Image: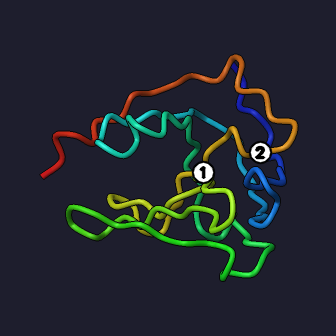
Amino acid sequence: MSPRPRTRFDGSCHCGAVRFQIVSDFPELTTCDCSICRRRNALMVKVHERDFQLLSAPEALTRYQFHTYTAVHYFCRTCGIYPFHRQRVAPDHLGVNVFCLEGFDPAGIPVRASVGADMP
């Protein structure tokens, strides 16, 4: 299978208070089995911070941290939707919830299950 072209997507939370843009070639999508990811059931794409741009005011976000307090999970202050998080194992990358991307179709992209529950 040939690589996908790098594509820009706009993303937002449900109410539109949080808006962002990413660029990715979507080599794979991931799920995670840690306690928070199991509950939010997001499907994520990993993007480098240089390929992510927050378009809304940072004040529209609230953050949540747990366990080692390394990963930072962001949520909309208004509607509570999880659009992205800063990753624990790769702090220069963000995990972006692909269900927040406008016009994105995840069909045909491989999905890898990452193991978060057993991380020390």
- Binning the other alpha carbons within 10 Å of mark 1 as few (below 14), some (14 to 19) or many (20 upward) gives many
- Binning the other alpha carbons within 10 Å of mark 2 as few (below 14), some (14 to 19) or many (20 upward) gives many
How is the structure coloured here? rainbow
- Residue at 48% across / 40% down in the picture? 40
- Residue at 52% across / 24% down in the picture? 111
Residue 97 quadrant: top right
Which structural element holds mark 2? loop
Residue named by callout 2: 101
Residue sitting at the far left: 120
49 shown above or below 116: below
Side (left or right) of 95 relative to 39? right
> Which of the two discs, 1 and 2, labels the residue nearer the N terminus?
1
Side (left or right) of 46 relative to 12? left
Task: Tell which of 57 and 111 is nearer to you.
Answer: 57
55 shown above or below 86: below
Locate the N terminus and report the quarter of the image it occupies: top right
Residue 70 percent location from the top left of the image = 30, 69
Residue 91 percent location from the top left of the image = 41, 68
Instruction: Quote the CA–CA distance across marks 1 and 2.
Output: 9 Å
Proximity of marks 1 and 2: CB atoms separated by less than 8 Å: yes
- Residue at 12% across / 52% down in the picture? 120
Q: Amino acid at mark 2?
A: Leu
Residue 32 percent location from the top left of the image = 38, 36
- The circle on residue 5 is none
